[in-house]
Amino acid sequence: MNRLVRLLPLAIALVAAGCSAVPEAAAPDVTESTELMGRLASLHVPEAFSAEGSITVNTPTMEQSAGFEMIARGDDSVKMSIFGPFGITVGAALFTREQFTAYNALNNTVYTGSPERQLRSLPFVNAIPFEFFMGTLQGMHILSSAAQHGIIRADGAGRFSFTAVNADSSIDSLRYDGAFGRIVSCRRFDAAGTEQWSIRYRYTRTDTGLVIPQQVELSVPFRSTTLIIDYDAVTQSAEAAAFTLPYPDDAEIITVQ
């Protein structure tokens, strides 16, 4: 469990790192393409979001699961707590646009620093827009407005495949499912065509028709690392909880440079 807590910043950042099969030729007509891009452009993360479930990290040296609770507010801030046996809080992390803070309760240590720097400290994560990070944590893949979208292919039954070329020449290959109005998978390739990572989203609908995430699964093949977040309960509300991360006065504080 202590190893999972130490990986809490990694686990949270990994969820943000995603970006499915490379689309083939034959695009639908312009009306369909324009309508799809319009739908995707109108997607935004919820103003309020809370969830609980389990998080699993698999690497060549460990396989560990723990419970979590998460509260997020739009694309501005998110707070996650990790629970061990008997519901004991063993770690927590807070991301805002200005600050990253994580607390390891098992060794009474606080890690703090720039959120962008924390994300970039992982060698397989490049410059990730904060909004993309926030959307993925909430089970929603938000397209970058700066990406150049390629050929769109209709796969039938309201499903589409298309590519997006990013500013760094990496290529995202995505699949969209009209049944949920969401991107359901994405694979990122570098400029040389080597797969960097893949991410898959699974959704369900509530009795009222609300689309909510069931699972986010991220794989980083060249590091044999997989991160899975299973959402057991999701509501589009963030309660009235304060977005602060309390910790003991005697905690050791380490600044992530």
Image: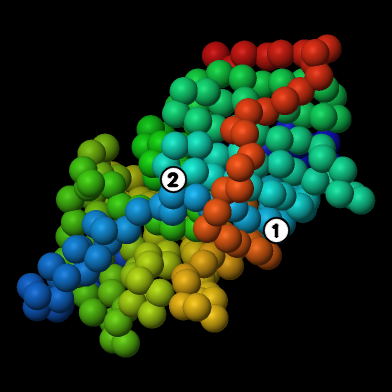
Residue at the image point whose x is 50% and y is 27% from the top? 115
Where is residue 148? Give x, y as percent.
17, 50
Element marked by disc 1: strand
Numbered badge on residue 74:
2
Q: Report the quarter where the C terminus lies.
A: top right
As measured in the structure, the alpha-carbon distance from the residue carrying label 2 to the one carrying label 1 is: 20 Å
Name the quarter where the N terminus is drawn: top right
Dot 1: within a 10 Å radius of its alpha carbon, few (fewer than 14), some, or many (20 or more) residues?
some
Residue 31 picture location, percent across and down:
9, 75
In the image shown, does 203 or 243 lie closer to the viewer? Answer: 243
Write down the quadrant of residue 72 in the picture. Answer: top right
Callout 2 amino acid: Gly
Label 2: few (<14), some (14–19) or many (≥20) C-alpha neighbours in 10 Å:
some
Q: Which residue is mark 1?
A: 53
Asked if residue 79 is positioned above or below residue 34 in the image, the reply reads above
Establish if 161 lies above or below 42.
below
> Residue, x 84% and y 24% (percent of image)?
107
Quadrant in which residue 186 is drawn: bottom left
Q: Closer to the observer: label 2 or label 1?
A: 2
Is residue 12 found left or right of 83 in the rendered image?
left
> In the image shown, does 63 or 78 lie closer to the viewer?
78
Is residue 3 shown above or below 137? above
Amino acid type at circle 1 is: Gly
Residue at 34% of width from left, 45% of height from top?
190
> Can I make out residue 117 in this image?
no
Q: From where the camera sits, is residue 67 visible?
A: yes
Residue 217 or 233: which is nearer the viewer? 233
Q: Position of residue 127 (x, y in %)?
A: 38, 33
